[in-house]
Amino acid sequence: MTDDIAETEWQWFRRAVRDSLLRPRRFAASLAGEHYGLAGVLVAILAGMALSVSVDSLVVASKGLDPLDFTGRMIADAAFLGLRLAILAALVSGAVALFMRLVRHTELSIDRAYTSVTFALTPLLVTPLLAATLAIVPESLPLVGLFAVALLARLLYGVLINLRPLAPLPLAIVALLIVVASVPATLPDQVSRIEFTALAYQPTFAAERPATPATGRTIAGEGYELTMPARWKQVTLGLPGEIGRFETDTDVLVVMRAAGSAFVTPDSYAENVAIPWRRGLDNVSASRSVFRIRTLVVLDDVYTGTVGGRPELLRQFTAVVGAQGIALLFRYIEPNEVQALSESAAIVATWRALGR
């Protein structure tokens, strides 16, 4: 005689997570008949925490620092992102349920949609393994990159296959697109961090920008080297944080240290410099692009506007070497925009980060 052994809540939860990760079809088939309740909340929190720890550790390691020195901060970040992901998953699930109701005139409950979305996130639980592998063995980048692409495909497949038992295939595909479109809208900071972390490990993901390097006098400063055309004169440093300053009769180039921390990516360094630099600029239009100079990844921010009714063009190039950020800040007053953009690009084409 065989006695039935009752399955505890935690055993049931572990089995559900295991099936969702390793047997996605079996798990998807159970969605229509089993109620998962708050289990989806816990899965979303754990998935968010795993993603946060993975990204944080890679950002820190890319700067030559030891992630273990920042354990407390990483735990706090992980808890915050886990809770945030659980809340955002609820909002996205509500949108999916509303869409289903509108097009089918029948109800797909939010809890079913929530379970479908959150349990599809279980592949994120393995991201710390990939992050640890890359942080410890940087030469494993091609293999880790391959697994990361496979992981992304597995995430998308998980969402689709979880929704499939609850809706016809065309509607499930549209619901998948709703989920995908929500990611950059609800987690833009994490998308940006992942993008710049990938560039830190593989700069060739950024395209080189063709530009004829400037000719003139080569000047080496604290951590940088530039070639400046004859019309630019080196002048005495003025503002705190300046490590270089050049002027013409109307224009200014300031080389600045960009403040940041172990956890921030180049976009945050750029914003820290840009806020005071563009203060007073009205009617602002802005654009951003990313490129590389050899292996140096550079953010290119262009701001146009007016100061006291007078046209100005501000162009900022920001790069991070190790944990140190450097920004080249051009200010053109009443500029010929085409010439200003061309000249600044030519000067930056000569930029070398010393010690790199």
Image (tube, rainbow, N blue to C red):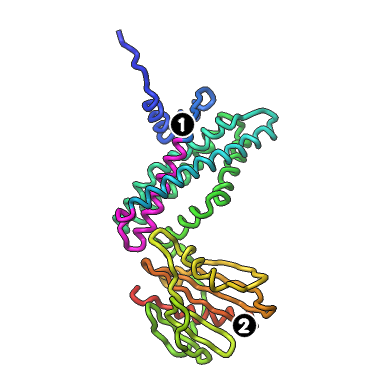
- Picture quarter containing residue 275? bottom right
* Residue 164 locus on image (x, y percent): 56, 32
Type of the residue with mark 1? Ala
Give left or right: position of 71 versus 342: left
* Front position in the image: 302 or 80: 80
- Residue at 55% from the left image edge and 38% from the top image edge: 90
Q: Residues within 10 Å of mark 2 (few under 14, many from 20)?
A: some
How many badges with numbers are in the image? 2
Question: Is residue 55 part of the magenta span, yes or no?
Answer: yes
Give left or right: position of 170 versus 140: right
Circle 1/circle 2 CB separation < 8 Å: no
Quadrant containing the N terminus is top left
Type of the residue with mark 2? Ile
Stretch in magenta? 42-70
Mark 1 and mark 2: Cα distance apart in space:
59 Å
Q: Residues within 10 Å of mark 1 (few under 14, many from 20)?
A: some
Quadrant containing the C terminus is bottom left
Label disc, if present, on residue 333 of the rendered structure: 2
Label disc, if present, on residue 39 of the rendered structure: 1
* Front position in the image: 350 or 248: 248
* Above or below, 10 relative to 92: above
- Residue at 58% from the left image edge and 76% from the top image edge: 314
Question: Is residue 179 part of the magenta span, yes or no?
Answer: no
* Above or below, 322 relative to 89: below
* Front position in the image: 309 or 218: 309
* Residue 73 locus on image (x, y percent): 37, 52
Label disc, if present, on residue 257 of the rendered structure: none
Pick out the residue farthest to the top. Answer: 1
* Residue 184 locus on image (x, y percent): 55, 51
Say what secondary structure mark 2 lies in: strand
